[in-house]
Image (cartoon, rainbow, N blue to C red):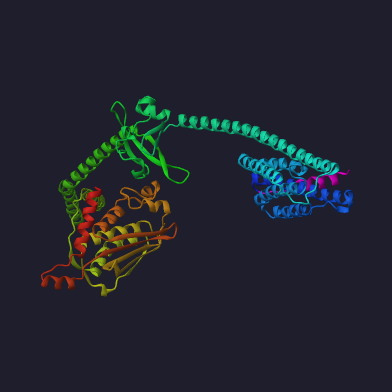
């Protein structure tokens, strides 16, 4: 017999396959039972037709049974596994009982097939079906007995002859052998699956044990404290770092409420609000308090319910000590800075008076030297005058900065003509611009007119910006543009100072308005200056409630834009007549001064 023939026979006795393993097993048994039943039925029909007078003893049930078996086989392959299984059992039982009643009653060889029904039922559906089938078989035998005794069997019931009985029992024996071998095979497969399950279970247990040891090692090696609590807030697990942090033994913590460690965690866990990274205080069993950086993450069950939480904490005792030291150092530095600022602000008169005297006497001596024609002495006296004025300007800048830091810089509002103020500033700047061969361009329309603001600080801002532009520009152009605008809906005067000088990098722009700071170390050596002018200008803009912006490109030039709020003198006059006073500039100045005082 070729291998292809064996393969076809094997496929013939194999049932359909399904995703579920148990359904596939039942389908295989039902398939085999239907194939065997159909085969036995067809063989029995053929034998009776050939051997027993051309089918004279052939029963109608002999033809019905194989036909129904083939129909159930088709039903099985359509997926009705358990329906076909119950049907083949009921069909086999009914056929056996009916055939026995038709061919000899209790002496019929068909009764031997009941054992096949019991075996198939046991293989398919287990113990309960087995007991039910045994009960049906006993009832069938009891019914046949009373029917035979009472003469209720069919009148034409046939006695089975020797050959018929022999053939029937041989078929039953062969079928019983097939199904018993199938039962043994199923038991062996079940035993093999059980052993494979044991091996797999041991592997899973080993993997779980290794995973547990791995997790325990991770927890033990953590530098942070870790506490696992259940849904009631009781401690279930602690790591080595927690025991070391709290200087405690495991039995002092396990099973106790987490509130013994963290007093804020008094409520049960489901009602405790979830927190991020926050500062908390752990309490050791001995009462020692430990500042920690604390975080909590919920543990979820299979259905998303909260079954506990993982609490992680880091000891920040050293950080808190360092923070306290830094706070004390900062406070001492601020007190020293304020003392310095107060000292310089209070020394304004004492520092300026001697310098004014030196400058005054130098000018008197210059006049006298000029009258006497002492040209050599005149040059020396000019140097004294220039040095004195330079020193006076430097001291004035330092004193202004000190007043700003001390919060003692006042705002003095007055009405002035913008064009006249600009012309006054230009009178100071023009000589410096001519010295560097720079062209000074001014755009200040007369229509700007008068405004009500702080004249001194506005003039000082422009003077500082133009001085810087002149200082860093050589054989170039410096442009001053004045105009009126709106800033956040409030009237403002805008000044734009643009130059074609050396420009600045983005790094230099980042520290532009810091006191005593310039672009780099070479700037002060090459161009001079203390780096206070822009810092004072920025502070003045803040005090007046305005803004100062800068744009620059290295080698191209720099543009400063200043916007300062003001009050229209006409509206100011009307408000005074009506008994009210426009506080646009005054309020902005007071807010800015209070902000500067807080920073100081």
416 relative to 25 in the view: left or right: left
In the picture shown, does residue 587 fall above or below 193? below
Q: Nearer the viewer, residue 112 or 512?
A: 112
Q: Nearer the viewer, residue 438 or 103?
A: 103
Q: Nearer the viewer, residue 317 or 178?
A: 178
Main SS category, magenta section: helix
- The spot of residue 528 in percent (x, y) is 34, 50
In the picture shown, does residue 22 fall above or below 422? above
Q: Is residue 11 magenta?
A: yes
- The spot of residue 215 in percent (x, y) is 50, 33
Task: In the displayed orientation, state which residue is furthest to the front.
Answer: 150
In the picture shown, does residue 261 fall above or below 407? above
Q: Is residue 391 magenta?
A: no
- The spot of residue 28 in percent (x, y) is 71, 45
Q: Which residues are magenta?
A: 1-18
Q: Nearer the viewer, residue 356 or 39?
A: 39
Visible residue check, residue 154: yes
| Location of the N terminus (image quadrant) | top right
Quarter of the rendering containing residue 545: bottom left
């Amino acid at each position: 017999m070729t291998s292809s023939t064996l393969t076809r026979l094997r496929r013939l006795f194999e049932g359909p396959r399904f995703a579920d393993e148990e359904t596939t097993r039942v389908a295989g048994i039902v398939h085999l039972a239907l194939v065997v039943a159909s085969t036995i039925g067809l063989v029995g029909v053929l034998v009776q037709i050939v051997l027993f007078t051309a089918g004279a003893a052939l029963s109608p049930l002999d033809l019905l049974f194989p036909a129904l078996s083939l129909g159930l086989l088709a039903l099985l392959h359509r997926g009705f596994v358990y329906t076909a299984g119950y049907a083949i059992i009921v069909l086999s039982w009914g056929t056996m009982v009916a055939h026995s009643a038709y061919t000899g009653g209790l002496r019929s060889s068909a009764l031997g097939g009941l054992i096949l029904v019991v075996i198939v039922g046991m293989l398919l559906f287990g113990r309960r079906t087995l007991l039910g089938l045994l009960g049906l078989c006993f009832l069938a035998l009891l019914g046949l007995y009373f029917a035979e005794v009472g003469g209720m069997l069919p009148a034409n019931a046939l006695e089975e002859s020797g050959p018929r009985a022999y053939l029937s029992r041989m078929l039953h024996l062969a079928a019983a052998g097939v199904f018993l071998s199938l039962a043994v095979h199923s038991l062996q497969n079940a035993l093999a699956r059980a052993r494979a399950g044991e091996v797999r279970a041991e592997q899973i247990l080993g993997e779980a044990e290794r995973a547990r040891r791995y997790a325990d090692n991770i927890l033990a090696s953590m530098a942070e404290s870790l506490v696992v609590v259940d849904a009631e807030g009781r401690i279930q697990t602690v790591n080595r770092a927690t025991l070391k942090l709290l200087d405690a033994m495991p039995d002092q913590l396990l099973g106790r409420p987490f509130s013994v460690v963290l007093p804020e965690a008094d409520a049960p866990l489901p009602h405790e609000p979830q927190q991020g990274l926050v500062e908390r205080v752990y309490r050791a069993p001995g009462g020692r308090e430990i500042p920690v950086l604390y975080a909590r993450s919920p543990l979820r069950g299979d259905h998303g319910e909260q079954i506990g939480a993982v609490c992680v904490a880091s000891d920040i005792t050293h950080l808190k000590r360092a923070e306290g030291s830094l706070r004390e150092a900062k406070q001492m530095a601020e007190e020293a800075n304020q003392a310095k600022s107060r000292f310089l602000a209070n020394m304004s008169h004492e520092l300026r008076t001697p310098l004014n005297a030196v400058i005054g006497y130098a000018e008197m001596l210059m006049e006298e030297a000029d009258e006497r024609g002492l040209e050599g002495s005149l040059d020396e006296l000019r140097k004294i005058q220039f040095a004195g004025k330079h020193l006076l300007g430097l001291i004035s800048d330092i004193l202004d900065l000190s007043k700003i830091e001390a919060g003692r810089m006042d705002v003095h509002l007055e009405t002035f003509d913008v064009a006249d103020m600009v012309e006054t500033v230009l009178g100071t700047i023009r000589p410096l611009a001519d010295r560097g061969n720079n062209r000074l361009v001014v755009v200040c329309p007369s229509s700007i007119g008068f405004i009500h603001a702080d004249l001194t600080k506005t003039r000082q801002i422009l003077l500082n910006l133009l001085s810087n532009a002149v200082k860093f520009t050589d054989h170039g152009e410096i442009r001053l543009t004045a105009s009126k605008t709106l800033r956040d809906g409030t009237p403002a005067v805008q000044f734009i100072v643009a130059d074609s000088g050396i420009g600045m990098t983005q790094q230099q722009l980042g520290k532009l308005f810091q006191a005593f700071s310039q672009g780099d170390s070479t700037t002060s050596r090459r161009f001079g200056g203390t780096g206070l002018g822009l810092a004072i200008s920025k502070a003045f803009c803040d005090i007046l409630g305005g803004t100062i912006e800068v744009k620059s490109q290295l080698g191209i030039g720099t543009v400063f834009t200043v916007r300062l709020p003001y009050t229209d003198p006409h509206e100011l006059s009307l408000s005074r007549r009506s008994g009210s006073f426009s506080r646009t500039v005054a309020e902005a100045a007071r807010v800015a001064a209070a902000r500067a005082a807080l920073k100081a």
